[in-house]
């Protein structure tokens, strides 16, 4: 039962262009969403987050959009840089599990930014 | 200055053995976690401790036993290892809800 889905296993973009990574969720009790970035042989690192009361959060080149009615969020990276090449995990949290600290992760999308 | 560290980084062992993975965080966080990333790449929570108390215990075989001697350490002991235990295990810590800091992972291979 995948409550957080990242349907694109991989994405390839040119340097300088926009990267758009998508994520869908099924549990309407989720109230906080996050994106993590992971390089090979390293642990995931927190990138950006958004509360369910917002529809957009921006941090430098990274913007996360949330569409609650569609249960969909996306991460935009612009301009994309070769150093952005990594696996991006979407994660969600909420009170359904009885704890705010429990994150449910998607399967990840491998982003490759070509020079 | 590694914020969340795990040892060992790689662990190769035979079925039936008992092994431990250690985790330490120097961030002063109250909450620590163990996650398992299996061959299908899903990252799933196993356990969570807050100030040395177990607060999350997912459906994990009781061969897996976490131990938190203090709030900076959360170790994972696995008894009677099975082939299906092969995975990458990540430790994480958290200062507040939602924001988690992960260690580099321990790749466990059971032969």
Image (cartoon, helix red, strand yellow):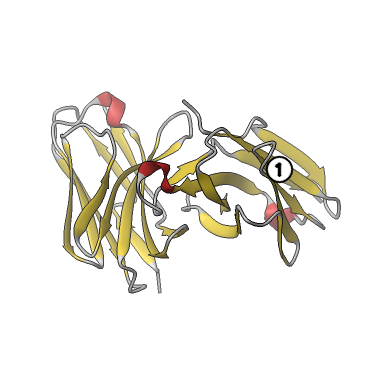
Establish if A112 lies above or below B39. Answer: below
Chain under disc 1: A
Specify the quadrant of the image occupied by residue A69.
top right
SS label for mark 1: strand
Give the quadrant of residue B37: top left
Does B57 appear above or below B23? above
Q: Which residue is mark 1?
A: A21
Judging depth in this view, the residue of B69 and A72 nearest the camera is A72
Q: Quadrant of the N terminus of chain B?
A: bottom left
Q: Residue at x 51, y 33 (%)?
A: A3
Please state the total of marks drawn on the protein image: 1
Q: Give the residue drawn at x 54%, y 38%.
A: A28
- In-image side of B80 versus A23 (left or right): left
Say which of A15 and A47 sits in front.
A47
For the C terminus of chain B, which image quadrant?
A: top left
Query: What residue sits 13% from the left and 36% below the top?
Result: B79
Residue A18, percent from left and from top: 83, 50
**B16 or B59, which lies in front?**
B59
The image shows residue B70, relative to residue A31, as above or below, that is below
| Residue A21 screen position, x and y as percent | 71, 43
Residue B25, position in %: x, y? Answer: 32, 67
- Location of residue A60 in the rendering, given as x and y in whole percent from the top left corner: 74, 67
Q: Is residue A32 left or right of residue A83?
A: left
Q: Is residue B66 left or right of residue A8?
A: left
The answer to which quarter of the image holds residue B32 is: bottom left
Of residues B42 and A28, the one drawn nearer to the viewer in this rendering: A28
């Amino acid at each position: 039962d995948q409550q957080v889905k990242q349907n694109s296993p991989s994405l390839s973009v040119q340097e300088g262009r926009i990267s758009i990574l998508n994520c869908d969720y099924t549990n309407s009790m989720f109230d906080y969403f996050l994106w993590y970035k992971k390089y090979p042989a390293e642990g995931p690192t927190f990138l950006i987050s958004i509360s369910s009361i917002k529809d957009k959060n921006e941090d430098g080149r990274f913007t996360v959009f949330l569409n609650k009615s569609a249960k969909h969020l996306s991460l935009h990276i612009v301009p994309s840089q070769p150093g952005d090449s990594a696996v991006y995990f979407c994660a969600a949290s909420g009170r359904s599990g009885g704890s705010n600290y429990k994150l449910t992760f998607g399967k990840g999308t491998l982003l490759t930014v070509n020079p | 200055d590694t914020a969340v560290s795990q040892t060992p980084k790689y662990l190769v062992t035979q079925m039936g053995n008992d092994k431990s993975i250690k985790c330490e965080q120097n961030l002063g966080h109250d909450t620590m976690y163990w996650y398992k990333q299996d061959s299908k790449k899903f990252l799933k929570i196993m356990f969570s401790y807050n100030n040395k108390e177990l607060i999350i215990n997912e459906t994990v075989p009781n061969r897996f036993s976490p131990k938190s001697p203090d709030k900076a350490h959360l170790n994972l002991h696995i008894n009677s290892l099975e082939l299906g235990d092969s995975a990458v295990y990540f430790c994480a810590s958290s200062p507040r809800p939602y924001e988690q800091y992960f260690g580099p992972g321990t790749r466990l291979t059971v032969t």
